[in-house]
């Protein structure tokens, strides 16, 4: 029975991934930004353990995950939570940049640092949910794309550093996925939204599970997913 630590399990890809892993009997540690969110996650995933910490304030992660509070062994750490704000570079203020980089980059870096001992013990797997914007930066999403390009660099450095410990690292680059974030972005860009033209969270979760289940003689280092048959 594998043990996984997930961020973003409250909705979208994170929720679909938690549901898939729980259904096959795996153990889940779920990060929640506050106590009400943790309560909802425990109700939805009654066998899970919840950790309350806000990714917008990554300095607090060490308080709840340092020392004996951390899981002793992890088969995977799945960084699925993220934030995206629309704004041309000329209109994006310091706060937008700070919030985006903190949640999408600094928090995953700190969470990975804290949980590496448990991942090394299990020769586990770190998965970073990136974006197509982490490969090609679109207009109006400069801060988001910058955070995802930087997340790609974090993953590549981590992969090289942890190879001696047999910790695998994968970055996933999905195209448009039918999630609340995607709906908000379409509304902000005043674009028509068609869920049928998007990947489903369940299809992305299935791809994540396949990455985790890949034999240990190799690593799926980068995975790009696009809508359509």
Image (cartoon, grey):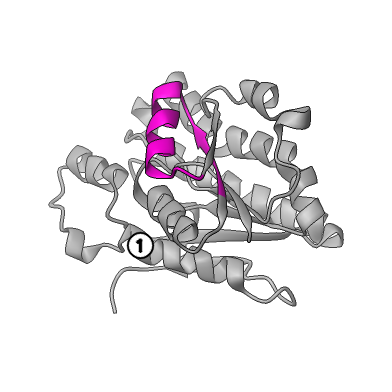
In the image, is residue 70 above or below residue 60?
A: below
Q: Which residues are magenta?
A: 28-47
Question: For the point 53% across and 71% down, which residue is it?
Answer: 210
- Whether residue 4 is visible here, answered yes or no, is yes
Outermost residue to the front? 47
Q: Is residue 30 magenta?
A: yes
Q: Could you tell me how many numbered marks the image carries?
A: 1
> Where residue 193 appears, x then y in whole percent?
15, 53
Name of the residue lying farthest toward the left? 192
Position of 26 with respect to 15 (left or right) is right
Mark 1 lies on residue: 202
Viewer-closest of 4 and 214: 4
Residue at 19% x, 58% y: name it.
195
Question: In the rendered image, which quarter contains the C terminus?
Answer: bottom left
Where is residue 53 drawn, in percent x and y? Answer: 55, 26
In percent of width and height, residue 32 lies at 48, 32
In the picture, measured across the screen, residue 50 lies left or right of residue 174, that is right
Image height check: is 169 above or below 206? above
In the figure, residue 6 lies in which quadrant? top right
């Amino acid at each position: 029975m594998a043990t996984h630590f997930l961020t973003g399990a409250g909705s979208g890809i994170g929720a679909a991934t938690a549901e898939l892993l729980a259904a096959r009997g795996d153990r889940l540690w779920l990060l929640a930004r506050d106590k009400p969110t943790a309560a909802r996650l425990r109700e939805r995933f009654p066998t899970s353990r919840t950790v309350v910490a806000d990714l917008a304030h990554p300095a607090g992660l060490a308080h709840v995950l340092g020392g004996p509070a951390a899981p002793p062994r992890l088969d995977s750490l799945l960084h699925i939570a993220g934030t995206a704000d629309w704004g041309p570079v000329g209109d994006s203020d310091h706060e937008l940049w700070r919030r985006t980089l903190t949640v999408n980059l600094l928090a995953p870096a700190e969470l990975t640092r804290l949980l590496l001992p448990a991942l090394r013990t299990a020769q586990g797997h770190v998965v970073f949910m990136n974006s197509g914007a982490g490969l090609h930066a679109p207009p109006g999403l400069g801060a988001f794309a910058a955070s995802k390009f930087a997340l790609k660099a974090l993953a590549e450095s981590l992969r090289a550093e942890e190879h001696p410990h047999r910790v695998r690292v994968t970055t996933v680059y999905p195209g448009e996925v039918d999630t609340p974030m995607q709906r908000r972005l379409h509304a902000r860009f005043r674009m028509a939204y068609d869920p049928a033209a998007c990947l489903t969270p369940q299809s992305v979760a299935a791809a994540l599970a396949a990455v985790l289940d890949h034999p240990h003689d190799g690593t799926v280092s980068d995975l790009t997913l696009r809508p359509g048959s």
